[in-house]
């Protein structure tokens, strides 16, 4: 109780930031309860005011940041930002079927991959031009390119604490959530203004909006057909999280100086197993909806815990450069997605 606490940690998916201690549930409960209450409060705000759940979870977590100094919170917050996030990623697989991905067609799938890589590369280039590290550019660009906050959390743990610190991660989470909420409102207006068809709009929205919920919501706000296409395209981007993590691990050596192994973590394997089962088994709708609800809750709880654990002093001293990286990467993703939609779905 009296020993000094280490610096707050974030979503430690691979145990590369802190060890996996053997702890009793009585040690985990205080911090876990706080994270769960923060998530429920975020859900209430999101439901009643139409705000993004991820952004609300992060902001409420940051408001409770003073609790990170309480040693009793450490175990539970670590459990929420590590174990719950892992299982949340596994359950996201319940939203995906292999048939949906194959049904895109080879050219559409290639376009999704190229847009993702171009957006990720833009993040790296803009970060270096702004005097930030390539690792931070990978973190911000990857969050824009794949699936918003959950991708940022996974990428941060792949990169390691020394390359992407907690202040940078927290700022990326805030920026990516705000950018996704803005995109959900404005991108459908752009699609209407340009005169896109439902299939074109669905591709553009699914390939450019950051968060899963916002991308799907924007698609259905355009039309039902656009919503279906946006869902498939967006979930294809989510499925690409695993190979991107492997690619990042290959390019960035571990903090100890050795090159990271090209192994796929169990939670990523679990994601594909759940997606495959969802493809071949007649899953009852209530089971699918329940899995999606639990996945959303777990991811939101992990984000709230990350906000609570973020070192606020360092966060406030980070500056606006990281937000510029997110903004430029988002504009590149939008432009490329619009161009691809016009080329792939003519007439």
Image (spheres, helix red, strand yellow):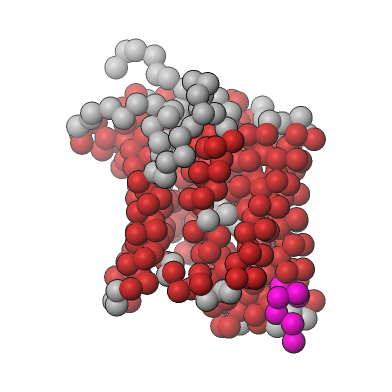
Q: Residue at point 55% right, 48% down?
A: 244
Relative to residue 336, is residue 66 drawn left or right?
left
| Magenta stretch encompasses residue 244 | no
Number of residue marks: 0
Q: Is residue 98 visible?
A: yes
Q: Residue at point 68% right, 69% down?
A: 204
Q: Residue at point 71% right, 75% down?
A: 344
**Part of the protein shown in magenta:** 341-347
Residue 132, quarter of the rendered image: top right
| Magenta stretch encompasses residue 343 | yes
* Residue 342 location (% of width, % of height): 76, 75
* Residue 233 location (% of width, % of height): 57, 68
* Residue 337 location (% of width, % of height): 71, 65
Nearer to me, 309 or 251: 251
Residue 75, quarter of the rendered image: top left
Is the C terminus in the top left, top right, bottom left or bottom right quadrant?
A: bottom right
């Amino acid at each position: 109780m009296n020993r000094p606490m280490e610096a707050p940690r974030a979503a430690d998916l691979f145990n590369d930031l802190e060890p996996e201690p053997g702890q009793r549930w009585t040690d985990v409960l205080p911090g876990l309860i706080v994270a769960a209450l923060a998530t429920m409060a975020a859900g209430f705000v999101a439901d009643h005011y139409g705000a993004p759940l991820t952004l609300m979870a992060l902001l409420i977590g940051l408001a409770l940041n003073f609790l990170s100094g309480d040693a009793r919170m450490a175990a539970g917050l670590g459990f929420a930002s590590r174990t719950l996030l892992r299982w949340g990623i596994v359950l996201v697989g319940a939203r995906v079927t292999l048939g949906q991905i194959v049904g895109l067609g080879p050219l559409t799938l290639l376009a999704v991959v190229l847009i993702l890589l171009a957006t990720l590369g833009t993040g790296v280039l803009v970060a270096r031009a702004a005097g930030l590290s390539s690792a931070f550019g990978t973190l911000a660009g990857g969050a824009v390119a794949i699936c918003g906050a959950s991708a940022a959390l996974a990428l941060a743990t792949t990169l390691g604490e020394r390359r992407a610190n907690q202040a940078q991660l927290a700022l990326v989470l805030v920026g990516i959530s705000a950018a996704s909420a803005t995109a959900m409102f404005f991108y459908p207006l752009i699609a209407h203004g340009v005169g896109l068809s439902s299939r074109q709009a669905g591709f553009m929205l699914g390939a450019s909006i950051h968060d899963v919920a916002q991308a799907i919501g924007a698609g259905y706000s355009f039309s039902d057909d656009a919503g279906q296409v946006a869902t498939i395209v967006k979930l294809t981007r989510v499925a690409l999280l695993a190979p991107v993590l492997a690619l990042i691990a290959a390019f960035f050596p571990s903090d100890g100086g050795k090159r990271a192994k090209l192994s796929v973590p169990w939670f990523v394997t679990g994601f594909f197993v759940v997606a495959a089962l969802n493809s071949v088994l007649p899953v009852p709708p209530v089971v699918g909806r329940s899995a999606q609800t639990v996945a959303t809750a777990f991811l939101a709880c992990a984000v709230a815990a990350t906000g609570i654990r973020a070192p606020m002093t360092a966060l406030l001293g980070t500056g606006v450069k990281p937000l510029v990286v997110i903004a430029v990467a988002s504009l590149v993703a939008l432009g490329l997605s619009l161009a691809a939609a016009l080329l792939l779905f003519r007439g």
